[in-house]
Amino acid sequence: MVRKIVEKILFYRDGDKTFFETEAFPWVADIETEWKTIRTELDALMVRREEIPNFQDISKAQKALTKGDEWKTFIFYSFGNKNKENCARCPETDRLLNRIPGMKSGMFSILAPRKYIAPHRGPYKGVLRYHLGLMIPAPEGSSRIRVGSDVRAWKEGKSMIFDDSNEHEVWNDNDSYRVVLFVDFVRPTIFPLSMVNRLIIWARGRYPL
C-alpha cells in the first residue's frame, strides 16, 4: 500500500517522463570526465569475457528476457550489497560508483552482437537508471534503447538517465559487443517522501515485494 502511494506521488510529479536531462545531476559530469578510466578496467575484463556470468544465471528473473551467453553482467553492487571481489578487480570503477548519490546497484552490462532484449519494465518507480556508454559499436544508432515512445542511442563517454518503470527494449544491431556502466540510484525526492522511498528500496533488497 505504501509503495503504491509513493509511486502515485512520483507519477503525479513526473508523469510518464522517460529520459531525464543529465545536467540536472551534477555528479554525471564527474563520471564522464573519467570514463576512460572505467573503460581501461573493462578492457582487462573483456579479454576473458567468457568467464563473466550470464545475467540469467545471477538473476532468475531475467530468464524471460535472455538465454545463453548473449547478455553478461559483471556486478559491483546489488541493492546496496557490495561484491568485494569484483570491486577489488576494478577499484577505479568502484571509486566512481561511490560518487553517485543513492547508488544501489552497479554493474557492467555486456550485450553480444545482434542481441535484442524484448520489452519489459522495472518493478518500482522510486529508482532511476543511469547508463554510461563504454564500448559502443558503429554505426551510430545501431545500439539503442526505447523507453516509452522515446528512442536514444548510446555514445561512448556519454550518459543517459531514464525511468525503467516505463516499458523499454534494447537493440544491438551490429557485429560487436555493446557495454555500458549500468546503475540504479535512488530517485531524488523531498522529505519525508525521500525517507519512505529509501525504506521501500531497502526492503526490496531483502524481501520480495
Image (spheres, rainbow, N blue to C red):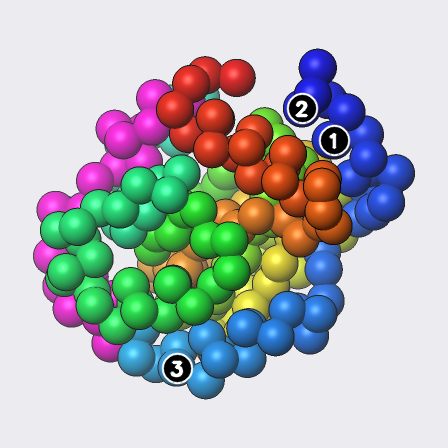
Observer-side mark, 2 or 3, equals: 2
Whether residue 156 is visible, yes or no, is: yes
- The residue carrying pointer 3 sits among few (fewer than 14), some (14 to 19) or many (20 or more) residues within 10 Å by Cα, namely some
Rendering quarter of residue 125: top right
Instruction: Provide the residue designation for mark 3.
Output: 34
Identified by mark 1, the residue type is Glu
Question: Where residue 58 sits in the image (x, y, percent)?
Answer: 27, 31
- Indicate the secondary structure of the residue bearing disc 2: helix
Residue in the picture at 67% in, 53% down: 188
Residue that numbered label 1 is attached to:
7
Q: Amino acid at mark 3?
A: Glu
Q: Nearer the viewer, mark 3 or mark 1?
A: 1
Q: CA distance from mark 1 to mark 2?
A: 6 Å
What's the magenta region?
40-61
Q: Is residue 126 above or below residue 107?
A: above
Residue at point 14%, 60% (across, down):
88
Nearer the N terminus, badge 2 or badge 3? 2
Disc marking residue 3: 2
- CA–CA distance between discs 3 and 1? 34 Å
Instruction: Place residue 61 in its image quadrant.
Output: top left
Task: Choose between 140 and 20: the one closer to the eye.
Answer: 20
Q: Are marks 1 and 2 in contact (CB under 8 Å)?
A: yes
Magenta stretch: includes residue 202: no
Q: Which secondary structure lies at badge 1? A: helix
